[in-house]
Amino acid sequence: KVKSVIFLNMAGGMSHIDTFDPKPGNGPFGSVDSSIKGVKISDRLSLTAKELHRINLIRSLTSETGDHEAASHLQHSGHKVRAGFSDIPSMGAVIASLKTKPGPYFPSHVTIGSRGGIVGRGGFLGNNFASFHVSNVDKPLNHLYPSGGKSSEERMYRRENMLSLLNETFEETISAQSIDVWKEMFRSSLDFMGSDRLSVFEISQENDATKKKFGDSSISKSLLLALRLARSGIPFIEVTIGGFDTHNNNKAQLEKILGELDRPLSALLGELGSSGLIDETVFVLCSEFGRTPRLTNNGDGRDHYPQAWSILLGGGAMKGGRLIGTTNASGERAESPIPAASMNASIYKAAGINYQATMYTSFGRPFPIVPDGEAIKDLFR
């Protein structure tokens, strides 16, 4: 049974040509054989190539949305932007809400790296399912205790009573729905501060052999933290890695990002596979769209391209080691195109969630989990 989703967001629009769908003569990099038979990927991902059989490569995702914000919204929810429905939750919040068991609060939705737009949004599901955000993996937990150190239980009890007294006095004169929201946030904060699971956020406690496999870059630490959170059964873990919006300086920028990504990505796939955690974890690596197969007139840039791009998807009930979908010889056209929302439907299905179900807001407004899109059948055969 799937407990966690690891969602790696390659923000900015990752070039499929320069990563997972190389075409001879269309880019600055070469290609290497992967552990999926007959499949080559960029030579900048040579370590990842050896672990690719752990999951599946899909090369024919497509959409009509080439704007960053709108495409990211579709990527993170399965919904197009709707002006009249501004509190649509992110997919992370939906999964967290449906997989969180009753009990003391502990984050069920964690975002690592940058966060903006719909990323991490709780929407109408509320703050408890919005993401707990880690902006600094070296210091993931801040302000849990006063600067003088952790307070005694007796002192905390006195402080809680004082705050309750002040709140009661305030509530006698002011009536507002936001008061209940703040009270719930306060209770959640106390649960979090007192949790015996906080150590899962501390990558310094990981064994040296595993830390060495991942490396010491910011991306390395982020993916190692994602692994630790998945081991702990956190329902949704998202890591955002930016810099893929390469209208200019494409070669140097991708050499840098892929150079930092390859080692920890291969280590993460290897650890998930060798430990058996892949059976309990859905793994996703995706971007909001691809980039033009042909370089722009400046000779070293690629523009937005939603007509075709590649993702990695596997784990849980999805048997790994398959290539699903292709593009034509130039990489400009998806053969047997797969709509972008089918990725969301497949993630939900793999996580044990009925993506065809409907949720409801507090006002009774219907929210279809995935309004348009079917799970990718070849993933579940």
Image: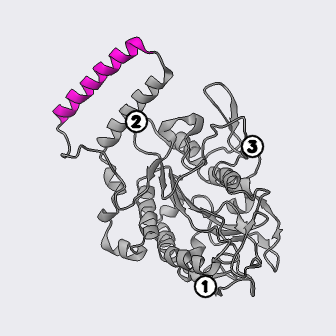
| Label 2, label 1: how far apart the Cα atoms are | 47 Å
Q: Would residue 211 be visible to someone looking at this image?
A: yes
Q: Give the residue displayed 48% in from the left and 25% down from the top.
A: 178
Front residue of 235 and 113: 113
Residue 276, disc: none
Label 2 CA crowd tier, 10 Å (few <14, some 14–19, many 20+): few
Judging by the rendered image, the residue that carries numbered circle 1 is: 43
On whether residue 94 falls in the magenta region, the answer is: no
The image shows residue 147 at horizontal and vertical percentages of 22, 46
Question: Of label 3 and label 1, which has the lower sequence position?
Answer: 1
The image shows residue 197 at horizontal and vertical percentages of 33, 49
Judging by the rendered image, the residue that carries numbered circle 2 is: 103
Total number of numbered discs in the rendering: 3
Question: Of label 2 and label 1, which has the lower sequence position?
Answer: 1
Amino acid carrying label 2: it is Gly
| Label 3, label 1: how far apart the Cα atoms are | 38 Å
Amino acid carrying label 3: it is Pro
The image shows residue 80 at horizontal and vertical percentages of 73, 47
Q: Give the residue displayed 69% in from the left and 62% down from the top.
A: 379
Name the mark nearer the viewer: 2 or 1: 1
Q: Would residue 49 be visible to someone looking at this image?
A: no
